[in-house]
Amino acid sequence: MQTNVSTEEKPKTTIPQKFVYFFAAGESEGNAGMKNILGGKGANLAEMTSLGIPVPPGFTISTEICTHYSEAGGKLPEWVRPAVTAAMAKVEAKIGKKFGDVKDPLLVSVRSGARASMPGMMDTILNLGLNDQTVEGLAKSSNNPRFAWDSYRRFIQMYSDVVMGMNSSLLEVTLEDLKEEKHYKLDTEMTVDDLKILVKKFKDLVHQMTGQSFPADPWEQLWGAVSAVFSSWNTPRAITYRELHSIPASWGTAVNVQSMVFGNMGDDSATGVAFTRNPSTGEKAFYGEFLINAQGEDVVAGIRTPQPITKIAAAASGQMSLEEALPHAYNQLVEIYKKLEAHYRDMQDIEFTIEKGTLWMLQTRNGKRTAAAALKIACDMIDEKLITEQEAILRLEPSALDQLLHPTLDPKAQKTVLAKGLPASPGGVNGQIVFSSEEAVEWKEQGKKVILVRVETSPEDIAGMIAAQGILTSRGGMTSHAAVVARGMGKCCVAGCGDVDVDYRNETMKVKGYVLKKGDVITLDGSTGEVYLGEVKTIEPKLEGTFERIMKIADGVRKLKVRTNADTPKDAQTARNFGAEGIGLCRTEHMFFGPDRIDAVREMIIADNKTERERALAKLLPMQRDDFYQLFKIMDGLPVTIRLLDPPLHEFVPHTDEETKDLAKRIGTDFERLRSKVKSLHEFNPMLGHRGCRLAITYPEIYAMQVRAIAEAACQLISEGKKLIPEIMIPLIATDKELDTLRVLTVNEVKKVQAEKGIKFDYQVGTMIELPRAAITADSIAEYADFFSFGTNDLTQTTLGLSRDDSGRFLGTYVSTGILPKDPFMSIDQQGVGSLVRMGTDLGRRTKPHLKVGVCGEHGGDPDSIEFFHRVGLDYVSCSPFRVPIARLAAARAALLGKKLH
Ligand code: PEP
Ligand code: MG
């Protein structure tokens, strides 16, 4: 391809050899494997064309040009134009019409299409190429002036909004005013003359508001539209969506220019979207919606509530289905969706238009689905022999399982049903109602739970949707913006709830005789579409059905064991129900905070000497023994790692004079003495202070009591015929000498208990590796350790020198500017902290080849980190109970991905 680069344009990125890809029946320059440069939409349009599926001819401008566009400061480089002009000429030749021809004009759509689908995030322009002359040509050639002028007014609305940055509601209000003046209810009642007046008014308004004339030259329109698509990659809503889904800014979007087909040419025309299986439940049933005599955006924008495609689905609502309205096109659509699903071997989300009875496909992509649907579809496709078990595991997104691990509404709870809408995205949630996205964000920041109530949502509402527990809309269908985006986020959504009358001005919603104000509480059931008054009780989820089946497949594949971080019997039980293979971290300090024991802990802390301290510790001993007994019993033979006391002592003492006075009274000590003790415990940097094993180096009796409690609980269980191997873990070790000292203390105490009880049991003494020095000297430390567990929370804090308590304030900026790829406390910094994990593991195993090594920081539940830990060769990860299934799946994926690489 000839490229002319003027001297003032010196792109940093190399100009690609080819960057415009043509597609039309019999000639397709791209394919589905080219998503990186063609974007998802462009790659699939090319692929569908090759499959012989009817796709309107067009071309894709590659994602690389998006980067050039940004580098040029938001300008389309001159050298892009000749290639686009050439591609347009090919489209003209295929269609037999000319772009800008006043007699029979070729019109085009201009759409974005990134590598990963970003529903509703990028802008689309339809009917491009219309002006005062071509509209007359279209009116004549189509023999339908109303259609031509309706297309023109739509084009001005879209173009002035997307390209010229005008507030779209101004034109909308003009349209509504005209309808009111003429006493029309529907847009379709507007006559040709009305539309002509409207077009004139629109253009005048555009001029008035933007100071620019509406462009009449089709080429000027096209360059404007292409530039607007590239610019929309960097709109705040696109950035928010990218951040939410970890999509790098560098990917860019492609631009698809395609000849128009019209769904608004009368009652034999329609437009619709469909899923080859139900995206909410996964049921194997063709599922979609359409509108007769409409253009694509009408369905997604939720302006008119669409009708179901199939007869069966329509029967319930008494609406007319596509199957009945346009049976020929419907049958063709069925044939195509089956072909597409078999070809892509996955559930497809498709868009189509029927122009005068002829079907055209405008898009196919792997459909977004809820976690429940993902599991059902995966299991069904295994049974249909469409995919293997391993493929099923690789397709499932571990973190999406989170949706299934949240409480659902208790079917037995008392409920007052307010209304029933569409079950757009499942889940049972309650919260206070708010009517704007901004308010949802503000209230969430104040710690409130909110439900965002809107007539319909638009991409501007993304931040509010993220902040809300759930979303309720009064308009729009199952494929409306609210429904699609909520499903993608795994957020509960009830859409198209027509009985709810939303009044933004008064901030109320009227339903069934109730008038609910901002702040009132409602509950949504996204699985049934029901809306309830007040808060409805919820129940804990269970692992069963397809979820259980997929977990079993994952267990057969993974190498990493999955344990849980649990300090209470309830958490331990929940984790076991979710398949935890033991406890990897029991933080014993959490057991110190109970109201019945905190005073004894405080007595121990303020003790002036060892005798006083031992007296206080003796009070704690039976309580701790009972705690451990229960955990061992629930875990029934599985490994249980008990970590000895970790936080600095000042965390347990009162902070105000008032509280100190109360405590002094309760434990019978002098206020002043207590106050000065509290003061003396103050540290400037407690995270690096007197905590972890350092507490036991100075006060060995604290750990001695805890070890005794563990040993006594073990003896009791053994005498009851139970099996167990306690793992005693020492935190915050920096040197081998510390561990040597505390190991001796531990072994001596266990020996004493065993001698007293006359019972022997096996146990292990290990350490956390959570300081860089420990990782670097892990070979020496391993001399005294039966196991290592990486405390990646502290290891991240100390390696990056980032306070785990304070860095939240500025880490967001680090991530949004790309200085750090992700929050290192959520996903392990593989290059830095990860290197220490690898080094610590390798050094430890150099001393003890079979040293058991795990991780118990928050990263143990993060899928990307789990993949890394698998590669390093750890034995297990430990995470919070609700992340156990996520970790099981992530570990299986890691094993499969590892195999693929080798
Ligand atoms: C850690 O530091 O990673 C860890 C698990 O310990 P804690 O979070 O209790 O400091
Ligand atoms: Mg720690």
Image (cartoon, rainbow, N blue to C red):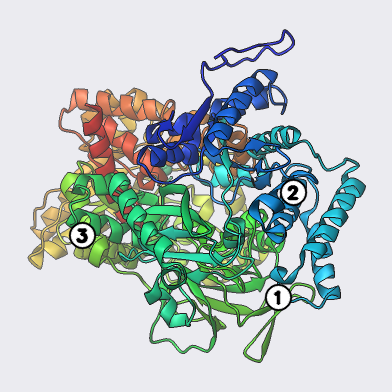
Q: Answer above or below: position of 858 versus 323.
A: above
Q: Position of residue 706 (x, y in %)?
A: 30, 54
Residue type at mark 1: give it: Lys
Residue on which the image places disc 2 = 135
Q: Quadrant of residue 228?
A: top right
Residue on which the image places disc 1 = 518
Rounded to the nearest angstrom, the CA distance separating label 3 from label 1 is 43 Å
Check the picture and name the quadrant holding the C terminus.
top left
Within 8 Å: ligand 1 and the Cβ of disc 1?
no
Q: Is residue 368 left or right of residue 292?
A: left
Crowdedness near tag 1: few (<14), some (14–19) or many (≥20) residues, C-alpha within 10 Å: some
Check the picture and name the quadrant holding the N terminus.
top right
User: Which one is in front, 426 or 683?
Assistant: 426
Marks 3, 2: nearer the viewer: 2
Q: Is residue 23 visible?
A: yes
Q: Quadrant of residue 759?
A: bottom left
